[in-house]
Amino acid sequence: MASEEALLYVFSDIETDSFRGGLLLQIAAITQDGISFNTYVNPCQNLHNTTVSLLGINFFQGNLYRNGMLLPSLKIKQALISFMTWIHDLQKPIILIFHNGFNFDCSILIKHLIKHQIQIPPNLIKVGDTLPFFRTQLKDSELENHKLATLATYFNIQQQSAHDAFHDTMTLKNICEHYITLKRIQLHDMFQKTRLISDYINNQLHGTPLPKLPKSPKTPK
């Protein structure tokens, strides 16, 4: 298995119709060196008003729209295959990095991959989450919460459009790059808490609880 230092970090985000993630609506990712992926997912059904209000995305007569503009989209199986193919074609061992990924994105993504019987490429090895790291490094007294938008404001990072997976992915990448420059650490120092992708597959298939992660040593100030 590749060491943490040998892994290629790919920042990623998804948008769904709700916290349950029944409908996947957007998948986005960007590598450390700027290779990007972004696709909208056609839900093939009407969206709840709360989803439309939050994401600004609407389904009408078979297509997705945002502010009246057509969003090119793929059906979910095509979108998932496209994302897994993109990861495979990077030809390096991959760790997918999300913000709040352990509690949400990873499980939702794996659930849909299993449901649609999409093969996970062998180079997708691990998933990581920036939320536990920033909760450790930035105490509650320093900021209201540890949401991505709050961190962006705290670090003076411009966020183009919240609740757009591609823009959120870019924001996450910029925050992490800013932080490693600020603290003079390596990127892999931020992700000592990672999980094997196989843990998530096993959990979704068999309901086996995910093992608790060991506490990370303190990052140098």
Image: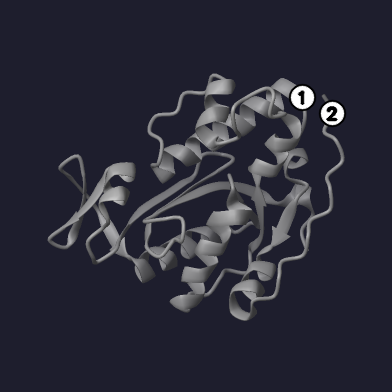
Quarter of the rendering containing residue 41:
bottom left
Task: Identify the residue shown where x is 46% and y is 77%.
Answer: 115
Task: Identify the residue shown where x is 72% and y is 29%.
Answer: 139
**Label 1 sits on what residue type?**
Arg
**Gap in Å between the C-alphas at discs 1 and 2?**
8 Å
Task: Please say if 205 is above or below 45.
Answer: below
Where is residue 45 shown, x and y percent of the image?
Answer: 23, 65
Colouring used for the render: one colour
Residue 220: mark in rendering: 2
Where is residue 137 shown, x and y percent of the image?
Answer: 75, 31
Quarter of the rendering containing residue 138:
top right
**Disc 2, SS:** loop
Name the residue carrying label 1: 184
Task: Please say if 107 is above or below 56.
Answer: below
Q: Quadrant of the N terminus?
A: bottom right
**Label 2 sits on what residue type?**
Pro
